Amino acid sequence: MPKLKTHRGAKKRFSVTAKGKIKRHKAFASHILTKKNSKRKRNLKKPTLVSKSEYKKIKELLPYE
């Protein structure tokens, strides 16, 4: 069985926590920030976890993480 390659784009975007959950950053925080209120922008800075429905797909992209 050959080794699996890590998806390099996924490697840069996701990180795995100590308990095996996958951490990601939120979208919509890079531009057009004037119409977004402070609370919304502040919450967009915080990392969050990948949903259960997406977890399996991301895990396949990161076989050795």
Image (spheres, rainbow, N blue to C red):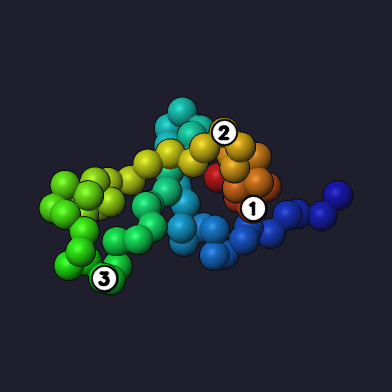
Q: Which residue shows up at 48% across the image and 34% down it?
A: 21
Q: Quadrant of residue 5?
A: bottom right
Q: Position of residue 31 (x, y in %)?
A: 28, 71
Is residue 24 or residue 36 the one in the foreground?
36
Q: Position of residue 28 (x, y in %)?
A: 35, 61
Q: Quadrant of residue 6?
A: bottom right
Is residue 17 or residue 52 the one in the foreground?
52
* Residue wearing tag 3: 32
Q: Is residue 21 above or below residue 61?
A: above
Q: Which residue shows up at 37% across the image and 52% down it?
A: 26
Q: Secondary structure at mark 3?
A: loop
Q: Position of residue 38 (x, y in %)?
A: 13, 53
* Residue wearing tag 1: 61
User: Is residue 64 visible in the rendered structure shown here?
Assistant: no
User: Is residue 39 visible in the rendered structure shown here?
Assistant: yes
* Residue wearing tag 2: 52
Tell me the mark number nearer the camera, choosing from 1 and 2: 2
Q: CA distance from mark 3 to mark 1?
A: 31 Å
Question: Of the residues under marks 2 and 3, which one precedes in the sequence?
Answer: 3
Kindly identify which numbered label has been placed on residue 35.
none
Q: CA distance from mark 2 to mark 3?
A: 30 Å
Whether label 3 touches label 1, CB < 8 Å: no
Tell me the mark number nearer the camera, choosing from 3 and 1: 3
Question: Of the residues under marks 1 and 2, which one precedes in the sequence?
Answer: 2
Determine the residue located farthest toward the front in the rendered image: 35
